[in-house]
Image (cartoon, rainbow, N blue to C red):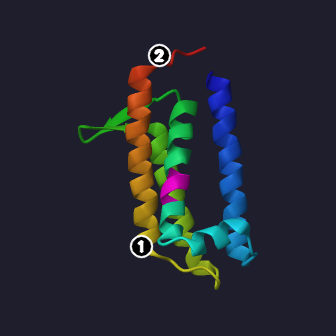
Amino acid sequence: MHKIAALAAVSFFLFLLWIIFLADTGTPSVFFDLARSLPYGDKLGHFGLFGLFTVLCNAACRHAAFTLGGLPLYRGSVLVAAFALGEELTQIFFPQRTLDAGDLLADLAGILLGAVVSHCLSRRFSFRKS
């Protein structure tokens, strides 16, 4: 099961990198058209993409966690949050992109929901090392 989760997380990461590349280069995409056609579509896209990526990364990391200031954190969630922050901050280097606090908040909300879903999954299913 762990290998499948790791493959899914890596595959989704590559998909995200492709989407980011398209956005950075200003290349049109059906995904961007869809986001523009929905109310708050861009924010919903950020929320969903980073939420799903968080669930996949937490599963790939076997729901490993650590405590920071008494707060338990999943390693996968922290990695996704760092990636999201880095990706949002790099947008200042691309003229066709805009650094948007709303996008970052949508990313973080998706990551938080993904962590909650991961917690529920880890309690529901046994994730033993294999």
Magenta highlight range: 46-50
Our reading of the magenta stretch's main secondary structure is: helix
Q: Position of residue 60 (x, y in %)?
A: 58, 32
Whether residue 19 is situated above or below residue 76 in the rendered picture: below
Q: Determine the residue positioned at 47% across, 29% down.
A: 63
Which residue, given by chain and number where applicable, does mark 2 sit on? Answer: 126
Q: Residues within 10 Å of mark 2 (few under 14, many from 20)?
A: few
Q: Amino acid at mark 1?
A: Ala
Q: Secondary structure at mark 1?
A: helix
Numbered tag placed on residue 19 in the rendering: none
Q: Secondary structure at mark 2?
A: loop
Whether residue 102 is situated above or below residue 98 in the rendered picture: above
Whether residue 51 is situated above or below residue 4 in the rendered picture: below
Looking at this view, is 67 or 128 the one in front?
128
Q: Amino acid at mark 2?
A: Ser
Which quarter shows the C terminus?
top right
Q: Residues within 10 Å of mark 1 (few under 14, many from 20)?
A: few
